[in-house]
Amino acid sequence: MKFAFKSIVVAAAFVAAGAANASTVLEAGNLNTFVPTGNGSQEVYFVSGSGALTFSQTLIDALNTGGVEVLAAAPATSNIAGLPGEYTAVGVAAPVSTLTVGAGGLIEQAQSVGGATQVAAFVKGVSYGGTISVTNLRIDMVNKNIYADFVGAGKTGSLATSPIVNVNATNVLAWTFTDIAGPTNITGPGTFDTTLSGLALTTEGFNNLKAGLGLYSIGLIALQGAAADFGTLTSTITVAVPEPSTYALMGLGLVGIGFAARRRAAK
């Protein structure tokens, strides 16, 4: 039986044509390429990215009310000024692990890893104490939603015997946002900075923070005041054109597949 190598090339072309109209998930650093505009322009691949959440002053004031400590949850890093209870600036940046792009290079979703951990001690009238980690943000650029994982435990009273509420919720709709400033399409190689503002905490997001930090009374009022003004999220995405050597290796791989197939067909 004769191996029809040409037919595989034709089939691959049809698959590529179909993929141009579908969403593509790109992993940071992996050389799975895509054509941003879908009209024969230069192929690029997702090199790296980060999502930096900057807390609003209203949220910082709420944290300072109970002396809540903010720590980075690896592999995220923090940018914090001041001590717990006296913060003047709080920010956390997490690496973007995957990017979902649609037709024309439209950025549909971005998934980050790591995040922030908040630790609350017992403060009368504010918090019974607890810890909550908010990690693995998934930004839905199309519907203006941000999802996250919540893991932690908070006390429900001041006594040693007071029950503890465990929080373990994944892929929670934590925030919505209203405004996007910056590019929403990848148009070619380069770095793209986009800022999301108008972040508002959802009811589910609020309840998870409340439970994990053991908030009550003044602590609840402070968090409620920050719910509609949580901060801003800035994503930085870098894409590049593969080196010529990459295409050479891809070509060698294709030739190798064809050679192996011909050998099987000859047997």
Image: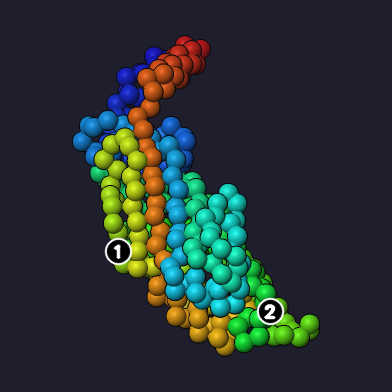
Q: What is the x, y in percent for residue 179?
A: 30, 63
Q: Secondary structure at mark 2?
A: loop
Residue 53 lies in quadrant: bottom left
Q: On the rendered image, what quadrant is the N terminus found in?
A: top left
* Residue underneath mark 1: 179
Residue 49 lies in quadrant: top left
The residues tagged by marks 2 and 1 sit, at their Cα atoms, a distance apart of 37 Å
Asked if residue 254 shows in the view, the reply is: no
* Residue underneath mark 2: 122
Q: What is the x, y in percent for residue 18?
A: 29, 40
Residue drawn at x 32%, y 40% as measured from the top left: 19
Q: Is residue 2 left or right of residue 115?
A: left
N-terminal label among 2 and 1 = 2
Q: Secondary structure at mark 1?
A: strand
Q: Residues within 10 Å of mark 2 (few under 14, many from 20)?
A: some
Above or below — where is 24 with respect to 150? above
Residue drawn at x 41%, y 34% as measured from the top left: 32
Q: Nearer the viewer, residue 143 or 184?
A: 184
Above or below — where is 68 with respect to 159? above
Q: Residues within 10 Å of mark 1 (few under 14, many from 20)?
A: few
Q: What is the x, y in percent for residue 107?
A: 33, 49
Above or below — where is 147 with respect to 125? above
Q: Amino acid at mark 2?
A: Phe
Q: Nearer the viewer, mark 2 or mark 1?
A: 2
Q: Amino acid at mark 1?
A: Asp
Q: Is residue 172 left or right of residue 1?
A: right
Q: What is the x, y in percent for residue 267?
A: 51, 12
